[in-house]
Image: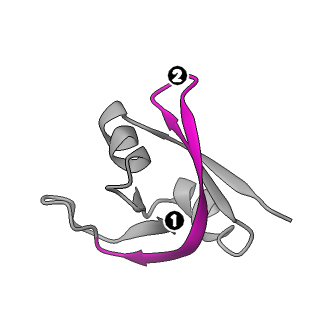
Amino acid sequence: MSKTINLIQTFNWYETTVTGRKRIEYRHVTTHWKKRIWDERKNLTHVKFGRGYTKANETFKILKIDKGPCPIPGWKDTYYRIHFE
């Protein structure tokens, strides 16, 4: 059975994702994201990104979910990382 997580992205990150330049989504390690991402990682098969709060959206197959750093300058700490096709 497939399970999809729905995530909202700002316009810039959405465009970067749907054009193929971004293939990892980063979310802070918090209680909220632990419940939605980390605790569900074995069940999640797809990630659906919404462009802001518009009707635009794209769905991608999840390759893996792990924890680690983010390469964006200034983003320190550990993040949940959703790798997708």
> Going 31% across and 55% down the picture, which residue do you hit?
21
Q: Is residue 21 above or below residue 6?
A: below
Q: Nearer the viewer, residue 82 or 21?
A: 21
Which label is found at residue 54?
Answer: 2
Q: Residues within 10 Å of mark 2 (few under 14, many from 20)?
A: few
* Type of secondary structure dominating the magenta stretch: strand
* Magenta segment boundaries in residue numbering: 48-69
Amino acid type assigned to the residue bearing label 1 in the image = Phe
Question: Would you identify the image quadrant in which residue 79 lies?
Answer: bottom left
Q: Is residue 35 magenta?
A: no
Q: Is residue 68 magenta?
A: yes
41 sits left or right of 58 in the view:
right
Q: Is residue 57 above or below residue 24?
A: above
Question: Would you identify the image quadrant in which residue 52 lies?
Answer: top left
Callout 1: SS: strand
29 sits left or right of 69 in the view:
right
Could you say where residue 57 lies in the image, as x and y percent from the top left? Answer: 56, 35
Whether residues under marks 1 and 2 lie with C-beta atoms below 8 angstroms apart, the answer is no
Which label is found at residue 76?
Answer: none
Report which residue position mark 1 lands on.
84
